[in-house]
Image: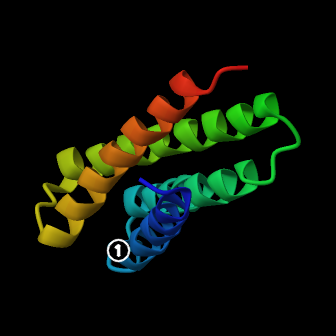
Amino acid sequence: MKQNDLLRRTCEFGVNCLIFLRGLPNDPESKLIRFQLGKSATSVGANYEESQAGSSKADFKNKVKIALREARESNFWLRVLEKLDGYDSEEFKTLLNESTELKNILAAIVNNTKL
């Protein structure tokens, strides 16, 4: 996979999560999840984007680690939604799957980046 592809995917993941979150109800639980998932999903791409201008391999790896933590958090909130409200639309399944894939890709980058 090319780096640009991951930049595109992380950005699209954040945007697609924000679009999905627009459809959540306005109850207190959904407000909490909307805020937390909105922050973590957009932070994946923001931190991966930042890693591209890292001043060193250590800086690059650190930014990717942050993106990985945010991808893990996004995956968590999506799983909470799945358990809480039983979401199973194609849109939701795509987000959940993409969060898992991004998590795996970012973990591989962290593990394979030698300092």
Using the image as rendered, state which of residue 79 and residue 106 is in the foreground: 106
Indicate left or right for 97 with 112 as reference: left
Q: Which type of secondary structure does the marked residue at label 1 adopt?
A: helix
Amino acid of disc 1: Phe
Question: Is residue 80 among the parts visible in the rendering?
Answer: no
Answer with the quarter of the image where residue 59 lies.
top right
Residue positioned 18% across, 59% down in the render: 93
79 versus 7 height, above or below? above
Q: Where is residue 102 shown, x and y percent of the image? A: 40, 47
Q: How many badges with numbers are in the image?
A: 1
Q: Which residue is mark 1?
A: 20
Q: Where is residue 113 shown, x and y percent of the image? A: 61, 27
83 versus 9 height, above or below? above
- In which quadrant is the C terminus drawn? top right
Q: Where is residue 5 shown, x and y percent of the image? A: 47, 64
Question: Is residue 99 among the parts visible in the rendering?
Answer: yes
Q: Where is residue 21 shown, x and y percent of the image? A: 39, 72
Residue positioned 45% across, 31% down in the render: 108
Using the image as rendered, state which of residue 87 and residue 8 is in the foreground: 8
Answer with the quarter of the image where residue 86 lies.
bottom left
**Coloration of the structure image:** rainbow
Q: Residues within 10 Å of mark 1 (few under 14, many from 20)?
A: some
Using the image as rendered, state which of residue 69 and residue 80 is in the foreground: 69
